[in-house]
Each structure stands twice: as structure tokens, then as C-alpha cells.
Amino acid sequence: MNKTTIIIPILLLHLFNTALAQDTTLNTKFPVTGTFKGTYIQNQASVESPKKGVLQVMIMHRFGRISDGLYDLFGLDNATIRLGFDYGITDKLAIGIGRSSYEKTYDASFKYRIFTQQSDNSMPLTTSLYAGLAYVTLHYPEKPYYDGKYRTNYFTQLLIARKFGSFFSLQLTPSWIHYNLVPEADDKNDVFAVGLGGRFRISKRVSFNTEYTYLLPDQVNSTQVYNSFSAGFDIETGGHVFQFVFSNSQGLVPTSFISQTAYQWRDGDIYFGFNLSRVFQLKKKKTVPSGY
């Protein structure tokens, strides 16, 4: 295990604790909103979800690796894409479905907000439960036993976030993934990881986002995998949130990018891409107090 793998999570956790201790409280109490501008930080899901009666259409697109060079126009000749739909059942509960070209994967999920950060720190964190499944439909003629049971994988994540004023938000994401089938006996069916993500506001509509997912050691042993690291920018334009993404992960759902990232940044194996979301108000909008 290299030193960077250990140091980055420790530094981010220290930053989280320091900022939490130094944050000042406000005299008035209201729910804190806009911890993140989108429902994703980059690849990681954020604590945000569509409000009641809101349908979000999400397109996640990753080109090939920049290291592929000029022949593939630095990855632009290749692409992985996910089309997703998320709908707010209530202001706290949202459901979603999606389809990714990576291993021709279908996914279904729900996100439930357990706690909402309050301006007076009576509740210092926003916490959501995010869980779902992914079903791989890619043909494997050499694996006739690879049926529906083995093609289905599950994920559960606890999204714990705090907004520190108007310019900085941080999220901690403990994650559990279960694979019904793994490549080798040395690989674990249950995989655990911890993600950290942050948002740094640059202007009213632009922010810098970054995230890192630390995969606990000795879980995936049959192949070489690396921790997922992504960085990019959010641009908010009315009903759209446009995200530029640079990542060493090609997969677009937790079951793929957390434990199947096969490349690393230092070799130039970076996937450039974007997330684009558009929301549609399908039911009458409810007015709620706004946060800071």
C-alpha cells in the first residue's frame, strides 16, 4: 500500500473535524440547503435528491483514457455513458433507475434523507441512506453459469455531509458492496470502502468538486485495482447542473467504480467526461424556508 493511499483519507478526516469545530452557529434556526448543487459529487452520490414531485434526468458521460493518445484523440473516440432517472416521492425519499454502457448494467436505487443539518447546529449534519442494486447484462458465452443471480450486485452507502458556510461542503461516505459472484476464491463477496468528497464554491454558479474513495485492503486480490479519485467543476445554469469530471474510474455506479478501478492518475490513465442533469417539476412546487 503506498503512502498516498493512507495519507489522503487522514488529511481529509482531519479537515472535516477541524472545520466542524470552528464552524460558527447562527441565531436563527432553519434547515441548511444546497450542501451540494447536484445529486452527485462526481461519481459518488451526494446527500442531495430531487424534491417531492420533481423528476431529474441525468446523463453521465466518460470518454476514453487521455493516455490513449492522438490515435484515439486522447480518449474522445471512446465513451462510457449512463442515462438515469430520479424522482422525488417525498422531500426525503427519492427513487431512481439507470442504464450504463459499462458492462451493459441496469441499476435501481433509493435515497432517503434521515437528518437535515440545522443552522443553529441542533443537527450538525445532513445524513442520507443510499442503497440499490446493479444488474449486468453483458454477454459472457464462456460462462453459461452466469445467470441472473450471479449478475446481480448490491450496494449500501451512508452519506454524511456538512455545509460549512456558503463556500465549503464536505461528505463522508462509508460503503458496503455485495457481489453474488467474484472472480476468484481470494476475492471477497462483501467489500467495504470509505469515500470523502468536497465542494469548494468559486462563484455564485461555479464550484470545484473533488472526491476520493478508499477501498479497504485485502478484499479484491485476483486483479490489480486502485482507489477512485475524481476532480472537476460544477456549473449551475437554471434547471441544469453541468459537471466537468476527471477521474481514473470508468464505471458509473458504486458496484463498478469503488472496487473495479483498474487505472491510476500517475500513469495518465484519466477519463475526462461530464455529468448533465435537468429537472422537471411534475407536481406543484412547495415553498420551504431556504438555507444559507
Image (spheres, grey):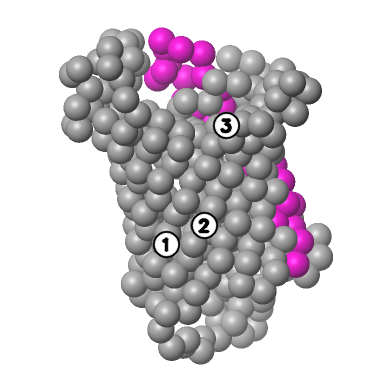
- The boundaries of the magenta stretch are 205-234
Q: Nearer the viewer, residue 69 or 269?
A: 69
Quarter assignment of residue 268: top right
Q: Which residue is denoted by mark 2 in the rendering?
A: 58
The numbered mark at residue 55 is: none
Q: Is residue 183 above or below residue 283?
A: above
Residue 86, numbered circle: 1
Seen from the viewer's position, the closer of residues 36 and 136 is: 136
Q: Is residue 13 visible?
A: no
Residue that label 3 marks: 249
Query: How far apart in space, not on screen, are marks 1 and 3 (Cα)?
Result: 23 Å
Which three-letter amino acid code belongs to the residue tagged 1? Asp
Say whether disc 2 or disc 1 marks the residue closer to the N-terminus: 2
What is the quadrant of the C terminus in the image? bottom right
Residue contact between numbered discs 3 and 2, judged by CB atoms under 8 Å: no
CA gap, disc 2 to disc 1? 8 Å
Asked whether 267 falls inside the magenta stretch, the response is no
Q: Of callouts 3 and 2, which one flags the residue occurring earlier in the amino acid sequence?
A: 2
Nearest to the eye among marks 3 and 2: give it.
2
In this view, the residue in front, 252 or 76, is 76
Residue 37 coordinates in the image, percent (x, y): 62, 63
Marked residue nearer the N-terminal end (1 or 3): 1
Crowding at label 3, few (<14), some or many (≥20) Cα neighbours within 10 Å? many
Query: Which residue does the image show at 64% across and 16% down from the upper left?
Result: 2
- Specify whether 94 is left or right of 117: left
Q: Disc 2 vs disc 1: Cβ atoms closer than 8 Å? A: yes
Label 2 sits on what residue type? Answer: Met
Q: Is residue 276 left or right of residue 98?
A: right
Q: Secondary structure at mark 3?
A: loop
- Residue 249: percent from left, percent from top: 57, 31
Give the structural element (helix, strand or loop) at label 1: strand
